[in-house]
Image: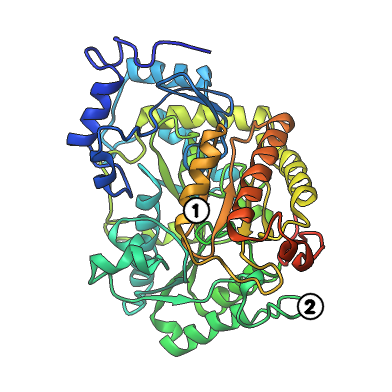
């Protein structure tokens, strides 16, 4: 397929080379070292069109987007219904001041989400313009909630090591990624971090027959050490993203946190910015694990990223605390609940429910997992297959018996480039041990999954040849044959 890379209507006077020049001279690319873009021969990937699970670059090359934008284009590309809803709202009224006013799309969306969220019915919704702001708002809401209830010293938080919760200062503080936090100190005080629940590499029970929940015990010990009368909230993800699609080691893990919060008055915050809106096979990730938190943060899939929007969903018992004589929740954002974004979210929600995209994620996710298991059960460099629904990770190792990771992280960059050359976009996550993450639009087909597995097989075999584990006598003698049964919660 070929087409004009950049149409004159969208960027008059800008062809591909001039756009790349603008990137070199003027643009900050997020989480990127811009020095690499200074070389005139460097050709950053310029995506200009999408349809379904496929995107095309400025040169007309097509790619399967197994990252769904950034874990976010859940309904897939090319959804005219969402675009038309946005256009209709923009023509009628493009903006409403959210400070004391409300738009119709925001009110309707809040009503629908309040009924659908696993929060006991009729949750109240605070809209933001993205995931970091949703987490930031949830933390502020939790702290003010505790103050209004007469506990002004409850200002500490507990999150997990390696977890990613956003980039604003409060969200960054609960992040468990030291590399992201280090250059911005001092951060918001009071953020405490517990170990993650990671069966494959758990320092407590990875060699046990099942999760012993010592990872939860560490949270409880931290609460005891800090003092439950000083902790405002515990925030976790249903399936932890950073580190590579890590579900809890036991189905009891979140139930234990829920019980702890009930007993201490701490708020339980489930960060579903990635896991919400069908990703795990249920509309909300909390439902997948059968738990009812106090607050849920969402973004990304709420509009399938057709427009920026995030939200904090608060259980009525929490929200109603702010209905007293005080000023209400002392927080606001200019673009929180933008009417055009809320219109996009309503159309996206209709698509998700009418087409049962959560159900498709469950079914197609099970198929993809089955094919990955069959393809890599004996591969010497694939140590673990884990995740849920259409949020799956393959952890890569240099030795599957010892679970030793390969030390050269540059291999991940090479691996990403190799896959991209074959027409596949995904993330090879290096924020913990190297993990290939698969997170496609929820409308991905089984045929597309087959193509993904074939590309991965080729790339992982080449990785093995570079590591000396594939195509050698040593590799044949050292391979342990076993199915990649994940030591974690099953789908």
Left or right: 335 as drawn, with respect to 312: left
Percent x, y of residue 305? 45, 34
Residue at 53% x, 48% y is: 415
Residue 88 vertical placement versus 383 (above, below): above
Instruction: Bin the neighbour count of mark 1 within 10 Å (Cα to Cα): few under 14, some 14-19, many 20 and up.
Output: many
Q: Position of residue 251 (x, y in %)?
A: 71, 67
Vertical arrangement, residue 347 with respect to residue 24, above or below: above
- Disc 2 element: loop
Give the labeled residue for mark 1: 412
Picture coordinates of residue 309, whole percent (x, y): 40, 39
Q: Secondary structure at mark 1?
A: helix
**Who is closer to the viewer here, 244 or 118?**
244
Against 147, residue 218 (above or below) is below
Q: Earlier in the sequence, mark 1 or mark 2?
A: 2
Q: Position of residue 379 (x, y in %)?
A: 73, 56
Which residue appears at 55% of the width and 71% of the height? 196
Relative depth, front residue between 225 and 48 = 48
The C terminus, quarter of image: bottom right
- Quadrant of the image occupied by residue 157: bottom left
- Name the residue tied to disc 2: 209
Q: How many marks?
A: 2
Please report the residue visible at 17 percent of the width from the left and 35 percent of the height from the top.
25
Q: Is residue 297 visible?
A: no
Left or right of residue 285, residue 90 in this image: left
Residue closer to the observer: 78 or 371: 371
Q: In the visual, does 103 lie left or right of 68?
A: left
């Amino acid at each position: 397929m070929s087409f004009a890379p950049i149409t004159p209507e969208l960027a008059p006077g800008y062809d591909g080379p001039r756009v790349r020049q603008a990137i070199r001279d003027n643009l900050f690319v997020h989480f990127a070292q811009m020095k690499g873009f200074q070389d005139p021969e460097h050709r950053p990937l310029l995506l200009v069109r999408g349809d379904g699970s496929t995107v095309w670059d400025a040169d007309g090359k097509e790619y399967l987007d197994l990252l769904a934008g950034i874990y976010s284009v859940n309904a897939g590309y090319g959804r005219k219904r969402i675009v038309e809803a946005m256009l209709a709202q923009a023509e009628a009224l493009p903006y409403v001041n959210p400070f004391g006013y409300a738009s119709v799309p925001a009110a309707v969306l809040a009503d629908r989400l309040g009924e659908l969220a696993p929060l006991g019915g009729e949750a109240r919704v605070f809209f933001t313009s993205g995931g970091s702001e949703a987490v930031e708002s949830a933390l502020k809401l939790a702290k003010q909630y505790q103050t209004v209830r007469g506990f002004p010293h409850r200002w500490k938080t507990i999150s997990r090591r390696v977890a990613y919760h956003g980039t604003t200062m409060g969200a960054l503080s609960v992040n468990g990624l030291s590399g992201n936090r280090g250059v911005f100190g001092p951060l918001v005080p009071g953020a405490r971090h517990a170990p993650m629940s990671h069966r494959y590499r758990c320092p407590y029970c990875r060699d046990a027959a099942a999760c012993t929940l010592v990872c939860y015990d560490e949270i409880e010990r931290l609460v005891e050490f800090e003092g439950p009368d000083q902790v405002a909230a515990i925030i976790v993800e249903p399936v932890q993203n950073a580190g590579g699609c890590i579900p809890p080691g036991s189905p009891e893990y979140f139930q234990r946190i829920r019980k702890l919060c009930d007993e201490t008055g701490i708020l339980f915050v489930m960060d579903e910015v990635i896991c919400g809106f069908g990703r795990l096979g249920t509309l909300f990730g909390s439902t997948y694990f059968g738990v009812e938190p106090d607050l849920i943060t969402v973004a990304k899939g709420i509009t399938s990223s057709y427009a920026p929007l995030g939200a904090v969903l608060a259980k009525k018992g929490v929200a109603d605390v702010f209905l007293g004589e005080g000023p209400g929740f002392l927080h606001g954002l200019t673009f929180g609940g933008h009417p055009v974004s809320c219109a996009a979210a309503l159309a996206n929600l209709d698509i998700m429910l009418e087409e049962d995209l959560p159900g498709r994620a469950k079914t197609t996710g099970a198929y993809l997992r089955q094919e990955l298991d069959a393809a890599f059960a004996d591969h010497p460099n694939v140590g673990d297959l884990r995740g849920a629904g259409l949020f799956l990770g393959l952890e890569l190792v240099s030795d599957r018996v010892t679970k030793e990771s390969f030390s050269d992280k540059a291999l991940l960059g090479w691996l990403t480039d190799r896959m991209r050359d074959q027409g596949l976009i995904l993330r090879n996550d290096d924020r913990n041990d190297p993990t290939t993450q698969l997170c496609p639009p929820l409308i991905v087909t089984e045929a597309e999954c087959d193509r993904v597995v074939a590309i991965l097989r080729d790339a992982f075999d080449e990785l093995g040849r570079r590591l000396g584990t594939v195509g050698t006598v040593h590799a044949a003698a050292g391979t342990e044959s076993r199915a990649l049964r994940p030591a974690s919660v099953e789908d």
